[in-house]
Image: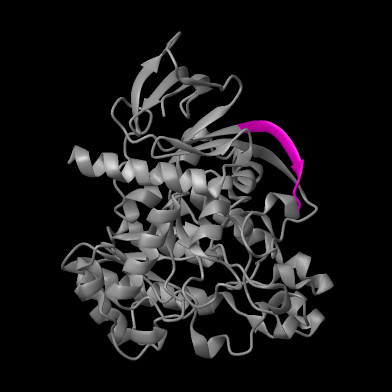
Amino acid sequence: MTMLITGATLPDGSRTDLLVGDGRILETGTALSASGAQLIDADGLQALPGLVDLHTHLREPGFEQSETVLTGSRAAAAGGFTAVFAMANTSPVADTAGVVEQVASLGDTHGYATVRPIGAVTAGLAGTQLSEIGAMARSRARVTVFSDDGNCVSDPLLMRRALEYVKGFGGVIAQHAQEPRLTEGATMNEGALSSELGLTGWPAVAEEAIIARDLLLAEHVGARIHICHVSTAGSVDLIRWFKSRGVQVTAEVTPHHLLLTEDLITGYDSRFKVNPPLRRRDDVQALREGLADGTIDIVATDHAPHPAEAKECAWDEAANGMVGLESALSVVQDSMVDTGLIGWADVARVLSAAPARIGQLAGYDAPFTIGAPANFTLYDPNARRQFGTEHLHGKSRNSPYLERSLPGAVLATVHNGYLTVQDGALRDASEVASQAETHRGAEAHRG
């Protein structure tokens, strides 16, 4: 397929035409023409490099009632994502080469997004012995990120050993920072509101204590560490201080922690139950400022689908987690761009270039340049939508934004040079799979 996109606004504010063919950017400039090319009028649209999510739960294998690689990657494409990193808490756990290769292969076959598996740090996520880290790194899936997300690697000796292991090949440990003894039975942020509601609180120090410990370990070992879903002002301060010391730490914040606060829990609506929990307004402000000044490197969705029966129940019994792929870009616009904290070039950095760099995903370092892989999204920042279930394209409906007015809309997503979203709608699965197969064949022939 050859496409000519006209009048797109790039992240730096300039306007250009883009000629796409053979899976790559063939030409850029103004007043381009190409006989027989599919024309896309992008006047008034923001062109962004393909979004990359470093923290997605695709649930397959084992929990296909919640999500699959196909449905999750469709949700990703609808949100403007062209690559996602799939967390390891599947069944069986992604702690062997065989499981991570299965997940990567499914992503390749379906074609809506590049799917890179994250390997478990410990066998079975049990926190007692290291997983087959080396085998996963050497596998066809080329795993570079390892995490027990959903569980904290709470044993300091085991965390040290993991950091030492991945240092040898430049991998990174992504830590779910939660001291388990301080959060037993916790279901929301600890504070005056948790006492008022009669709910067990999740104190900020439970996150901050693990971050401080692990950044000291990373400094001692000289290894890379990534902190998942940072949620407190104290955590931002710690990461900022350790970065000033030269520690190789990166960090992420979720869209929901940039926008939502603990006040939403007063109605005991389990859509707002998440781990780590929604925090105070002061925490939200600190997270926004940390993302704006570079202390926090990226936005990652922590897309966590659950079937209705796991969420539509009493607060204490409800599962933690929210879906977030389709809404992420809108929430970042709402909380960061429309508030004047960052511009579109920063959005491209925190939602594409930086997560790709952390995950060692090639092809995202020089978007919109001639010869670069054609992975991008066309986004209308002036649109407004009442977010509803019709905007969700995965299997689950546990979004905290239902019936909320959100800015922006993804009108097109291009993955490896072919459209996965066109005119705001997902393209047919068989067409996308066929184009993905054609692209794989062309890449194999190329080299």
Majority secondary structure in the magenta region: strand
Residue at 41% x, 77% y: name it.
148
Q: Is residue 203 magenta?
A: no
Residue 201 lies, with reference to residue 53, above or below; the image says below
Q: Nearer the viewer, residue 204 or 109?
A: 109
Residue at 34% x, 61% y: name it.
249
* Spot occupied by residue 152 in the image (x, y as percentages of width and height): 44, 80
Which quarter of the figure is the N terminus placed in? top left
Q: Is residue 222 visible?
A: no
In terms of image quadrants, where is residue 192? bottom right
Which range of residues does the magenta coloring cover? 380-388
Left or right of residue 299: residue 218? left
Q: Residue furthest top?
A: 31
In terms of image quadrants, where is residue 153? bottom left
Residue at 69% x, 65% y: name it.
398
Q: Is residue 218 visible?
A: yes
